[in-house]
Amino acid sequence: MKIEKKEKYTLISTDENSFSSFFESFSEKVSLYKKDHLILQISNNLYIKNEEFSLFLDIIEQKKENKTSFVIVKSNINIDDFRDNFNIAPTLIEAVDILEMEAMERELGF
């Protein structure tokens, strides 16, 4: 797992060969970034079943409670297969756009 601190968010990228090993590493470190907006960029080489994305639900809820954002970047995925509270974008640029939109919504009280 690769972690890069950016100006407005922290980017976490996968470099593991299996989802279970990645998720274990991610779960151990996510609490260190409780106050950060997170973008999780999942490699196209890492296969993830749609059901495995549900493991992120607790983290999504924690981020909302902390008034921070959590966006998953994964191309080749049908976002219509997921609930509305999942922020999934096909590119990093679109993920940053989601972060900015959520920041504006928070400022406006939504």
Image (tube, rainbow, N blue to C red):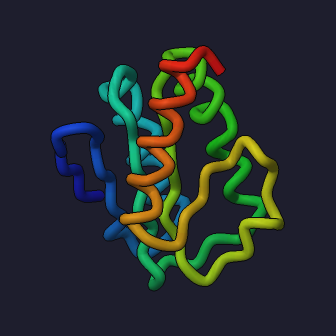
For residue 26, above or below residue 19? above
For residue 24, above or below residue 91? above
Q: Is residue 12 left or right of residue 44?
A: left
For residue 30, above or below residue 18? above
Q: Position of residue 93 (x, y in %)?
A: 37, 65
Location of the C terminus by quadrant is top right
| Residue visible at 63% across and 71% down in the picture | 48
Considering depth in this image, is 20 or 34 the residue closer to the camera?
34
| Residue visible at 35% across and 21% down in the picture | 35
Q: In this view, does 2 lie to the left or right of 39?
A: left
Q: Is residue 12 left or right of residue 101?
A: left
Q: Where is residue 21 in the image (x, y as percent from the top left)?
A: 46, 59
Q: Position of residue 68 (x, y in %)?
A: 46, 26
Label count reads 0
The quadrant holding residue 88 is bottom right
Q: Position of residue 75 (x, y in %)?
A: 54, 78
For residue 51, above or below residue 62? below
User: Which residue appears farthest toward the front when viewing the image?
Assistant: 108
Considering depth in this image, is 48 or 10 the residue closer to the camera?
10
| Residue visible at 28% across and 43% down in the picture | 10
The quadrant holding residue 34 is top left
Location of the N terminus by quadrant is bottom left
The quadrant holding residue 29 is top left
Considering depth in this image, is 29 or 3 the residue closer to the camera?
3
| Residue visible at 72% across and 41% down in the picture | 85
